[in-house]
Image: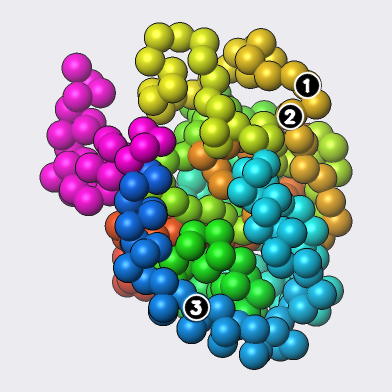
Amino acid sequence: MSRLSNVLNSLGTQPGYTLMRGVARFDTVRSVVAGTRGMLQRSRQRQLLAQCEQHRAESCFADLDRAAFVRQLRDEGIAYGLKLPPDVVAEIRAWADQQVCFADREPNLGFRLADRGAAEAELGKPILLAQYFNAATDCPAIARLVADPVLQWVAARYLCSVPTFVGANLWWTFPVQAMAADRARHAHVYHRDVDDFRFFKFFFYLTDVAAGEGAHVCVVATHHEPPRLKAGDPWNIRRYTDEEIATAYSPQRVHEICGDAGTGFAENTLCVHKGSTPRHEPRLLLQLQFALFDYGAMHDRRAPQTLARLV
Ligand SMILES: O=C(O)CCC(=O)C(=O)O
Ligand SMILES: [Fe+2]
């Protein structure tokens, strides 16, 4: 009953997004919609690819084997091999150090990184996650990455369409004894995202992420092979326990993605995946999401007058 009222509620507030989530869980629907849009946009997509090619030398990733990267993303649901230049990492880190981030992604729970202890005291609980708002508009290094010709090329090829940038997300996960409700709320539990008929995300670590330190975990090639543990699983959107995932897939398919600051990868997060809670070191992650359609559900834009400080 509460699930039904949730759906009705979101139909009222985000009708396009809610309807898409209702139907995009079916493979055939995803293929038909993505294929049709691809056909309609073929010439614009070609133009964009040619422009990206012309500007390739200006990219942070000019040496990437782009075709192999897209192939890997298609086949495995995840592709590795991006590396941000150190000056870009430093620029984003410096921006993040100065700006206010928001506990639990709540616009009224702002604090500066240096005041995390005071923010936790004020909130009365450990802060597992804090996100920045307006990152793509306010941080020039992030704005440049969104327009990067190699990232755009990958997005256009992977989506087989003119890509729509649907949102940046820049957030910290902190090494805390997090409440179970916060771990679930912040995706530290296995799940699959149904964010559009075709979509994917670039991920960039802005801190070093060693094993056990908040790595992103992906079960490779599950975008075409969801767990089938309960009736309805092929189309149900639900959370999975670690035990369920261990039963459903061989351990080799579970990738705990570690890397130095700057490490980047792309993932179709229709694959089973989760975040993990760091043990000692905070993790700063930038995510850039590209899709076919923008439902306004993913972006981090907030009017400055709606933002408030906790401390
Ligand atoms: O924090 C993470 O690594 C996981 C985040 C997540 O679930 C997502 O970006 O879709
Ligand atoms: Fe996710």
Q: Which residue is mark 3?
A: 46
Frontmost residue, 192 versus 206: 192
| Structural crowding at the residue carrying mark 2, measured as other residues with C-alpha within 10 Å and reported as few (<14), some (14–19) or many (≥20) | some
- Kindly state the secondary structure of the residue where label 2 is placed: strand
Numbered circles on residues, count: 3
Q: Main secondary structure of the magenta part?
A: helix
**As drawn, is 13 to the left or to the right of 217?**
left
Q: What residue is shown at x 28% (from left), y 44% (from top)?
A: 20
Q: Is residue 62 above or below residue 64?
A: below
The picture places residue 50, in percent across and down from the top left corner, at 57, 84
Mark 3 vs mark 1, CA separation in Å: 40 Å
The picture places residue 109, in percent across and down from the top left corner, at 45, 53
Q: Are marks 2 and 1 in contact (CB under 8 Å)?
A: yes
Q: Is residue 143 above or below residue 26?
A: below
Q: Which quadrant would the N terminus be assigned to in this image?
A: top left
Q: Which residue is mark 2?
A: 254
The tag earlier along the polypeptide, 3 or 1, is 3
Three-letter amino acid code at the position of disc 2: Val
**As drawn, is 198 to the left or to the right of 178?**
left
Q: Which residue is mark 1?
A: 251
